[in-house]
């Protein structure tokens, strides 16, 4: 009887903790990439999303380009995601996401980009 | 003499009361009629009419089938709305929430009478976060600078670039934004997106742009 109550309480605490984690941790990097980044960089990161039309002044960076992407440090990538193209002297066509995603989500995206470029 | 004057006044007062009663009655009839049409046609299957929107995650947003209308009266110009409901030309280039499929352009159409009643109904749906009278549409130079240089708003939105329509495709077209949108709503959306559209593919600019930049770019877009 007592054991049952204790187990129920532990189970409840764990459930609440789990829900809380999900809320504070935000979305997964894949989910964020597909939702925010792919509209320009493409679902596979090749720089070919629907916003990369002919008339745009610059093309979105190909995130699978190992050579080009390896020139950027993790801090460069983090800064450009947070503050936009301006941060690395690139075009403002790359928007700033620092007020849209949490720092943790942005750091996760940096790791995800490293997987995409294999660099 | 005195009694006659009082009597005259009474008649005027009671007449005006009846008159405003009739007026209010007919106005309400249109609003109620519009709401009935909205319900009968199941517009609510795709559109939220009771705000604010409680979405927290991308998953929540992906369940939605159409843009929110709970602030329609604060967002749209009435003349635009009544015309669009009869002849709904695509606003978004891509299908709702999609970055792969094109907008099929198959939105349901209403007759002029239905459109006028539904417009009366939708114009009663407002948001307290949209303060009317703040933004005057203006070919604002600072607004233009923000739109084209400081930020690349046209990265995701079609707009007139010189005499040509150009820009990105994932945001609603802003080509006729001035005919469609109220500047006050644009400003409220930029300033506090949480209160208007909490989950969206557009970046949050509050804290990136300052208040006068947001006002300027809202005035500029409202002048399109």
Image (cartoon, coloured by chain):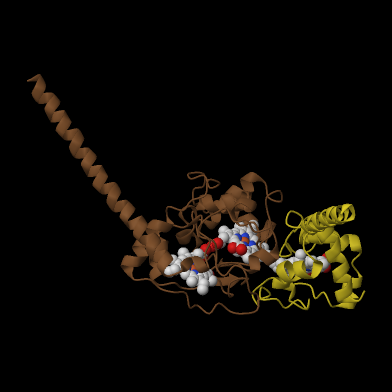
Chain colours: A yellow, B brown
In-image side of B3 versus B101 (left or right):
left
Q: In the picture provided, is A83 more to the left or to the right than B48?
A: right
B162 vs A72, left or right, is left
Residue under the image location 42 percent in, 62 percent down: B81
The percent position of residue B161, horizontal first and vertical second, equals: 57, 67
Residue B16 in the image: x percent, y percent? 21, 39
Query: Could you tell me which quadrant the N terminus of chain A lies in?
Result: bottom right
Q: Which sits in the foreground, B143 or A100?
A: A100
Which residue corresponds to the image point at 49% horizontal and 65% vertical from the top-left? B44
- Vertically, is B207 above or below B108? above
Choose between A9 and B95: the one closer to the eye.
A9
Residue B56, position as x, y percentages in the image: 68, 58
Q: Quadrant of residue A56?
A: bottom right
Looking at the image, residue B217 lies above or below residue B5: below
Outermost residue toward the left? B1
Which residue is drawn at the image coordinates 57% and 50% (left, top)?
B187
Residue B195 seen in this snapshot: yes
Front residue of B88/A21: it is A21
Front in this rendered view, residue B164 or B105: B105
Residue A90, placed above or below residue A67:
above
At horizontal 53% and vertical 45% (from top left) the residue drawn is B128
Residue B206, percent from left and from top: 68, 50
């Amino acid at each position: 009887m007592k054991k049952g109550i204790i187990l129920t309480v532990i189970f409840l605490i764990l459930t609440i903790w789990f829900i809380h984690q999900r809320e504070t941790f935000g979305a997964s990097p894949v989910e964020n990439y597909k939702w925010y980044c792919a509209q320009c960089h493409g679902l596979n990161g090749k720089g070919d999303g629907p916003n990369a039309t002919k008339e745009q002044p610059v093309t979105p960076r190909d995130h699978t380009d190992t050579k080009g992407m390896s020139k950027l440090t993790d801090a460069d990538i983090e800064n450009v995601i947070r503050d936009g193209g301006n941060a690395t002297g690139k075009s403002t066509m790359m928007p700033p996401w620092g007020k849209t995603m949490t720092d943790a989500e942005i750091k996760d995206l940096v790791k995800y980009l490293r997987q995409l470029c294999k660099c | 003499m005195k009694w006659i004057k009082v009597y005259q006044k009474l008649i005027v007062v009671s007449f005006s009361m009846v008159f405003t009663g009739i007026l209010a009655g007919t106005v309400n009839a249109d609003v109620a009629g519009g709401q009935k049409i909205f319900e009968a046609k199941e517009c609510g299957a795709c559109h939220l009419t009771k705000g604010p929107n409680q979405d927290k995650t991308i998953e929540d947003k992906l369940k939605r089938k159409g843009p929110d209308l709970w602030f329609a009266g604060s967002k749209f110009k009435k003349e635009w709305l009544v015309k669009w409901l009869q002849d709904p030309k695509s606003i978004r280039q891509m299908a709702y929430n999609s970055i792969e499929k094109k907008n099929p352009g198959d939105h349901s159409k209403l007759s002029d009478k239905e459109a006028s009643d539904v417009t009366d109904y939708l114009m009663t749906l407002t948001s307290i976060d949209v303060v009317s009278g703040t933004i005057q549409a203006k070919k604002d130079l600072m607004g233009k600078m923000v739109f084209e240089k400081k930020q690349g708003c046209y990265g995701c939105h079609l707009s007139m670039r010189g005499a040509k329509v150009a820009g990105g495709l994932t945001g609603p077209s802003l080509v006729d934004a001035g005919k469609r949108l109220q500047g006050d709503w644009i400003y409220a959306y930029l300033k506090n997106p949480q209160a208007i559209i909490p989950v969206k593919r557009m970046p949050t600019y509050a804290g990136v742009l300052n208040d006068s930049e947001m006002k300027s770019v809202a005035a500029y877009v409202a002048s399109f």
